[in-house]
Image (cartoon, grey):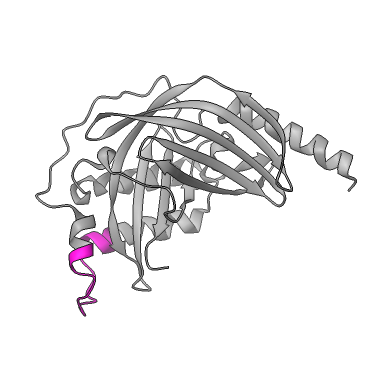
Amino acid sequence: MTLTKVILLVVLCFSSFFRKGVGAFSLSSRSNAMSRGRPQRSASRLEAAAASSTSTTTTPTNCDEAVCRVLELARQFGPIGSLQSPEDQERLLTIARELSVYSDPQPARKKFQQGQPPHCLIYSNSQGGSSGLMFGKVYGKVTQTFNNETCLINAVEWGPVRLSLSADLTVKDDWNTKVNFRLTTVRLFGQTLLEKAIQGAGIWKYLFAGVVRDNQWKQRLVRIIETPSLFILTQDLDD
């Protein structure tokens, strides 16, 4: 494939990403930002994980087991949930919603800083570019990187192509975050082909956020969000 064809393909991908993907990870004006009165917990699982990091205990908790079941099913379906049947999508959404009782308190108020490992998308049933879907059944790897507490970059990488959306975050309440997208960028082999200011806003509605140990005993921060599309992201903490 010639460089010209690659560039044309990137532009076409960008066009699809821009039309559909302004919903990336969040954008739905139809989303209801009202909190659903989820139960509060007395201590943060992040703090508990840090406090027990020197412990030799490796017995999984009920929370670990429940979250791992969701992660296993999400990985079986793959990152592009829209390719699954409506029944399977609903099945995963149902058990994901049940995790709210295990969540850290105030998940929308968690703070992330620059330099931390990226949050990797393992599942989304969004039909837009936010799931990593490029064209047909071709998809890229989706990551979310925080520059600071209120600024992040959602990126889709496919070979030498990188499509990214910069966004600002505003906490609405303990369970909901407003996302305002500011800039979209297309890069090829690290070179910027296009930057474009965009406008769009929506709500992340948290279903779960907390640290769990997976079946390999690795600690991961798991975040599960409705936009209203379902997004499941993990961040490795043991690397």
Quadrant hosting residue 12? top right
Looking at the image, which is closer to me, 112 or 119? Answer: 112
Q: Residue furthest bottom?
A: 56
How far across and how far down the image is residue 80, in percent?
55, 46
Res 227 → quadrant: top left
| Position of 181 relative to 134 (above/below) | above
Residue 77 visible from this viewpoint: yes
Residue 141 in the magenta stretch? The answer is no
Residue 127 image offset from top left, x and y in percent: 55, 35
In front: 184, or 120?
184
Q: Would residue 22 be seen by someone viewing this image from the given angle?
A: no
Give me the residue at 32% from left, 44% from top: 94
Label tally: 0
Q: Which residues are magenta?
A: 50-66
Q: Is 164 placed above or below 196 here?
A: below
**Residue at image coords 23%, 59%:** 63
For the point 57% across and 33% down, the residue is 128
Tell me the quadrant of the picture where the C terminus can be found: bottom left
